[in-house]
């Protein structure tokens, strides 16, 4: 097969490309330039897609003996990922930019271009497995990325390759060293790549400005503090609320809800965070269709954690997920990924974007 290997400049994508070559595929490496100022996208192990990363990807391609290109996706990335991220926070939501990047950039824009150029598949260094067309969790549970890949359609999965999903991270690094890849010991990138400082509130504040509002007690409606914008808060947040007086019971307060129009942030006790029902829109089913009119599943609301047995019921406006046990910290804008409820619980059924919780 003709395979386009997305090479971020890290160890995972380098080993994935190496395995594609070793399997006998005709492989071409590509690095995505996602910023007009790439030097600003890395600070230590934060961020990705900098000039340093492009150079690392090129060196890895040279070691593997494959052609290598850099494709400029900066405008698309800004519109579909960065602007979407800012708009979601302004609307009181909590988005996942890595998930959106997979959906809009790597497996939409990039895969579409790859297929148009005659490639058969896109190879990436994601930790997930594809078996008989089914997306499954990676062997390395700590690195599993099936949650952020649950947005992929049946068509996209049919043209994808995840060569390292069956291997623990430590072995991936060891293999990179054996293959002479200089990125074997390169630190993993983390946090949000376009916010290398790690200060999300400052990043959003610079783009949205000051939008004053009140922090209020959910039970009484009493104003407890003022704030500069709802974009500084997420559901489940405990610190940085600006409240100086303790609650009557002496227990911490948490963000329970965000109302962007009025600028109100509602806070209350931890128990009020319990969510038993999730409404979600824009469902994507990995097999191309829903598993049924009402079906049991495992629901996951965060990349690592936030997992509960559930029953999902697709409808004309999306899908309703009824949890058997409550989850906390579930916010509109997040994704809910649904997995098959067998003992392994590692087969992805689909995902949808959370719009409301109850």
Image (cartoon, rainbow, N blue to C red):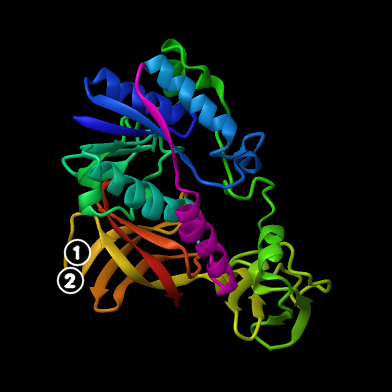
Name the residue rendered at 24%, 62% in the picture. Answer: 296
Let me know if residue 161 appears in the view: no
Secondary structure under the numbered disc 2 in the rendered image: loop
**In the drawing, what numbered circle is on residue 290?**
1
Q: Which residue is mark 2?
A: 293
Question: What range is drawn magenta here?
Answer: 65-94
Cβ atoms under marks 2 and 1 closer than 8 Å: yes
Q: CA distance from mark 2 to mark 1?
A: 7 Å
Residue at x 75%, y 75% (from the top left corner) = 227
How far across and how far down the image is residue 155, in percent?
A: 20, 51
**Residue depicted at 65% across the width and 45% down the height:** 196
- Label number found at residue 203: none
143 above or below 326? above
Residue 281 visible within the image: yes
- Give neighbour class at mark 2: few <14, some 14-19, many 20+ (Cα, 10 Å): few
Q: Is residue 72 magenta?
A: yes
- Residue 46 lies within the magenta run: no
């Amino acid at each position: 097969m003709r395979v386009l290997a997305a090479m971020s400049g890290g160890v995972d994508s380098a080993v994935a490309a190496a395995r594609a070559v070793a399997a006998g595929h005709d492989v071409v490496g590509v690095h995505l330039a996602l910023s007009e100022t790439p030097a600003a996208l890395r600070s230590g192990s934060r961020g990705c897609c900098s000039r340093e990363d492009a150079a690392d990807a090129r060196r890895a391609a040279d070691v593997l003996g494959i052609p290598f290109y850099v494709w400029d996706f900066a405008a698309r990335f800004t519109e579909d990922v960065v602007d979407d991220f800012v708009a979601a926070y302004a609307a009181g939501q909590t988005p996942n930019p890595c998930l959106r990047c997979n959906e809009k950039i790597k497996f939409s824009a990039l895969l579409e271009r790859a297929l148009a150029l005659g490639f058969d598949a896109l190879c990436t260094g994601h930790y997930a497995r594809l078996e008989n067309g089914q997306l499954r969790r990676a062997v390395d549970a700590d690195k599993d990325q099936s949650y952020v890949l649950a947005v992929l359609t049946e068509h996209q999965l049919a043209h994808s390759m995840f060569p390292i999903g069956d291997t623990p991270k430590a072995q991936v690094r060891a293999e990179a060293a054996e293959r002479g890849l200089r990125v074997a010991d390169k630190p993993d990138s983390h946090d949000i790549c376009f916010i290398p400082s790690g200060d999300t509130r400052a990043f959003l504040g610079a783009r949205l400005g000051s939008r004053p509002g009140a922090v209020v007690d959910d039970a009484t409606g009493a104003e407890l503090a003022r704030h500069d914008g709802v974009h500084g808060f997420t559901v489940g947040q405990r610190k940085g609320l600006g409240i100086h007086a303790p609650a009557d019971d002496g227990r911490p307060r948490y963000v329970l809800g965000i109302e962007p129009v009025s600028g109100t942030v509602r806070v209350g006790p931890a128990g009020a965070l319990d969510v038993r029902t999730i409404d979600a829109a824009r469902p994507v089913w990995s097999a191309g269709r829903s598993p049924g009119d009402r079906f049991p599943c495992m629901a996951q609301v965060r990349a690592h954690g936030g997992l509960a047995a559930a029953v999902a019921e697709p409808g004309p406006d999306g899908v309703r997920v009824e949890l058997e046990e409550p989850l906390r910290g579930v916010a509109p804008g997040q994704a809910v990924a649904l997995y098959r409820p067998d003992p392994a619980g590692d087969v992805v059924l689909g995902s949808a974007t959370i719009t409301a919780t109850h």
